[in-house]
Image (spheres, rainbow, N blue to C red):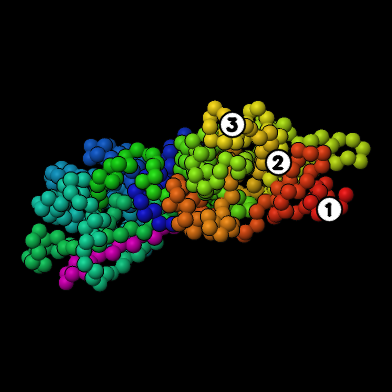
Amino acid sequence: MDMQSDFDRLLFFEHARKTSEANYAKNPLDAENLTRWGGALLELSQFQSVPDSKKMIKDAISKLEEALLVNPKKHDAIWCLGNANTSYAFLNPNLDEARGYFDSALQYFQQAVDEDPENELYRKSLEVAAKAPELHSEIHKHGLGQQAMGTGPSTSSSAKSSKKKKNSDLKYDIFGWIILAVGIVAWEMASEAKLCGGISAVSLSFRRSLNPFPCCVSFQTVEPSQVRFLAVAVVKRSPKRLKYSAPRFTKEDGLLYIEVDPLGADGWKLDPVVELLKEGAVGVIPTDTVYAIACDMRSHSAIERLRRIKNIGTSKPLSILCCSFRDIDTYTMGFPCGNGPGVTNIFRAVKHCLPGPYTFILTASKKLPKQCTRYGTSSSKYASRKNVGFRMPDDAVCQSILEKMDAPLISTSVKSPKENEWMIDPVIIADIYGQEGLDFVVDAGVRVADPSTVVDMTGTIPRIIRQGKGPKQYWMVAEDDKD
């Protein structure tokens, strides 16, 4: 997925910063982790005021320098240091003060090329870094530096208003962390272009993947008669970015859409989702059957939002998603006893089914929050069900979310509002339910329209209420079984 919104990027790199900080406490000699930490700080510096941005860039530089103390030949850290110094220089309107950082950047780019001579991006960075002071003078001369620092229109809005012309694409596969610090800017002098201000129209776009290894960044520039490519690190500011200066979410922020490996190899991407869930968000997550709309079962307001989003009444039962038998033991009265000669040990039999595609209806305990089982809409007058359905999905992504939450979720399967059919494509789910106020969607691929098997465990004999993906076990009784 492309991170098209500032909010997505803010969540992503804030998570990267926190993860790197935690990893540093465990292993302070991990040069790769220090490089990622520095890269995340450079990205996050965009969302700060200019003074705070400078402080964050300085912090990034210290992390990258520490990475080089561990591994002096780590070329991606060296290259990032070149970008960090360039970024800091462009934030300084005084060219004499900025020149020292430009000189340091040039040295770092040269060192990166020496370590990895075949890297085309490193060579291009070195080639154009020498022109950075000249561009600094030009943009501050014509007031463009103020735009970059947030007092004028953003670069993206300028790009949208420019006419479509023939573009050239420079694509680089970068092994490592992609940061904002390097852009390719088409620029020609006023005497050559005969343009007031001397700056040509620019269309700059970054295509970023949520998976940073490897990444692809695409620079698109308008092609004038003569073009000089300059490496810049201007921190773009806009009212929209300032609005997201702290992690939060509202409906106007849009839908957070995250693609993950179905096998759970990139579980670190789920941290923003867990944070949102703890704040009362409602979103779509995968299970071992169909996708589910889920929220924190401890949040009454989140449960009410879940019902409104799916447009279901309070009489519709919701299922509890848990990650261990400990949760089942805490929030239910447990499984029926079946000890004795010739009698199936139900608990032992269930352990062979879970995690798996089953929903077991059990008697709720007093520890289960009342909002998980209540009827009606009045907080003063409601009747609670005695029973509740519990699921323990055999899905790596779902299990990762539940483990990070350290608490069960309450959920309902995703169906089409009109056709009442299972929705198995997360892209379509986001398109339809995003309009209803959904906060996030976790995309783990298209699923099969095969729901869980529902088994009522409250009677003397486990009885199948709905046959689904989970096969009928010998100790279960189906509705069509003969007595």
Residue pictured at 25% horizontal, 60% vertical: 160
Q: Residues within 10 Å of mark 1 (few under 14, many from 20)?
A: few
Quarter that holds the N terminus: bottom left
Residue at the (56%, 54%) spot, across then down: 415
Callout 3, which amino acid? Tyr
Q: What residue would you read off at disc 3?
A: 382
Which secondary structure, mark 3? loop
Please provide percent x and percent y for residue 87.
25, 47
Of callouts 2 and 1, the N-terminal one: 2
- Estimate the spatial distance between the alpha carbons at disc 3 and disc 2, rounded to whole Å: 21 Å
Q: Is residue 445 above or below residue 345?
A: below
Secondary element under disc 1, as helix, strand or loop, is loop
- Residue at the spot x=19%, y=54% of the render? 132
Mark 2 vs mark 1: in front: 1
- Magenta residue span: 212-230
Where does the image place residue 408, in percent across and percent down from the top left? 59, 37
Identify the disc placed on residue 299: none
* Label 3–label 1 contact, CB within 8 A: no
* Quadrant position of residue 375: top right
* Residue drawn at x 29%, y 45% as measured from the top left: 241
Q: Amino acid at mark 1?
A: Asp
Residue holding disc 2: 361
Is 341 left or right of 153, judged from the image as shown? right
Residue named by callout 1? 481
